[in-house]
Amino acid sequence: MSRNRDDWVSQRAYAIWEEEGRPHDRGESHWAQALREFEQLEATKASVDGSDLIERLKAAGRILRTYDEASSEQENQGGRRKVASRRLG
């Protein structure tokens, strides 16, 4: 484990322990829960603009095609408007 990961998990496990009223003999379960939470956060971490997450979802087939179709349709309509305005002007 990296130092950053250990620090995060340790602090989170301590917070869980405090939230539960500081029970005895629960350190291992708190650590395991904190580790699961850290791994979950790491698995869902995205870039600042979210572009890598969108690409991963597309690759997994989890983004609906209607979203892609709607985006394409909006782009096409925008292009048609420009052409129409040039003709009118």
Image (spheres, rainbow, N blue to C red):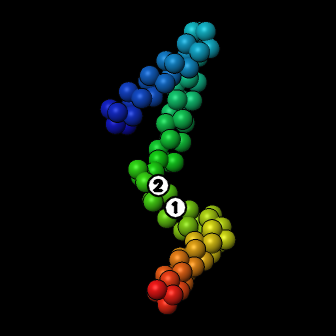
Q: In the picture provided, is 2 more to the left or to the right than 18? A: left
For the residue labelled by badge 2, is the local secondary structure a helix, a strand or a loop? loop
* Viewer can see residue 73: yes
The image position of residue 8, as x and y in percent, is: 42, 29
The residue singled out by tag 2 in the image is 50
Q: Residue at x 51, y 87 (%)?
A: 88
Q: Residue at x 49, y 18 (%)?
A: 14
* Viewer can see residue 83: no
The residue singled out by tag 1 in the image is 54
Q: Amino acid at mark 1?
A: Ile
Q: Nearer the viewer, residue 86 or 38?
A: 86
Instruction: Classify 51 as above or below 1.
Output: below
Q: Residue at x 50, y 33 (%)?
A: 35
Q: Amino acid at mark 2?
A: Gly
Instruction: Classify 37 as above or below 12.
Output: below
The image position of residue 67, as x and y in percent, is: 63, 68
Contact (CB < 8 A) between labels 2 and 1?
yes
Picture quarter with the N terminus: top left
Can you name the residue that lies furthest to the front here?
A: 89
Can you name the residue that lies furthest to the bottom here?
A: 87
